[in-house]
Amino acid sequence: MDPLLTALLILSALLILTTLLPWILAFTRKPGPAREELVSVLRCSKCGYEEIRKYNKGDYVGRPVGSCPRDGSRMVIKAIYVETLPQG
């Protein structure tokens, strides 16, 4: 076999391999499950101070949940949502 043809075949194979390898690795690598956490957003009814905390069983939007650390007014649950946390 001609050495030039052999070199071209090897070069072509390397080029195809280096082009397809990242795609194959990305396709086979599965991302781990995302961490999700249910959170409640608390808001002061007077000054607007907001605080985010972990959801507690029984929380609902509009529920009074203690007093504001700034002015002592009533805190109310404004929103409840799922927050996606980074892997790690």
Image: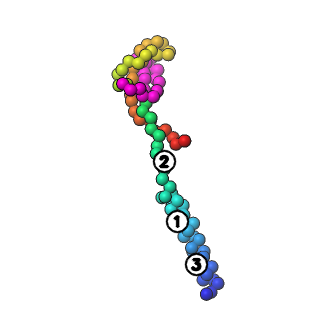
Which amino acid, by three-letter code, is at mark 2?
Gly
Q: Is residue 43 magenta?
A: yes
Which range is magenta?
40-58
Q: Residue at x 54, y 41 (%)?
A: 88
Which amino acid, by three-letter code, is at mark 1?
Leu
Q: Which residue is mark 2?
A: 32
Q: Is residue 9 magenta?
A: no
Tell me how the rendering is colored. Answer: rainbow
11 to 32, vertically: above or below: below
Q: Furthest-bottom residue in view?
A: 1
Q: Which residue is mark 3?
A: 9
Residue 63: percent from left, percent from top:
36, 20
Residue 48: percent from left, percent from top:
44, 20
- How far, Cα to Cα, is label 1 from label 2? 23 Å
Q: Quadrant of the N terminus?
A: bottom right
Tell me the element at label 1. helix
Q: Furthest-top residue in view?
A: 72
Determine contact: label 1, label 3, CB under 8 Å: no
Q: Residue at x 57, y 74 (%)?
A: 12
Q: Does the rendering let one see residue 62?
A: yes
Which amino acid, by three-letter code, is at mark 3?
Leu
For marks 3 and 2, the one nearer the N-term is 3
Quarter of image, res 19: bottom right
Q: Does the rendering let one see residue 46?
A: no
66 to 58, vertically: above or below: above
Q: Which residue is mark 1?
A: 20
Q: Furthest-front residue in view?
A: 57
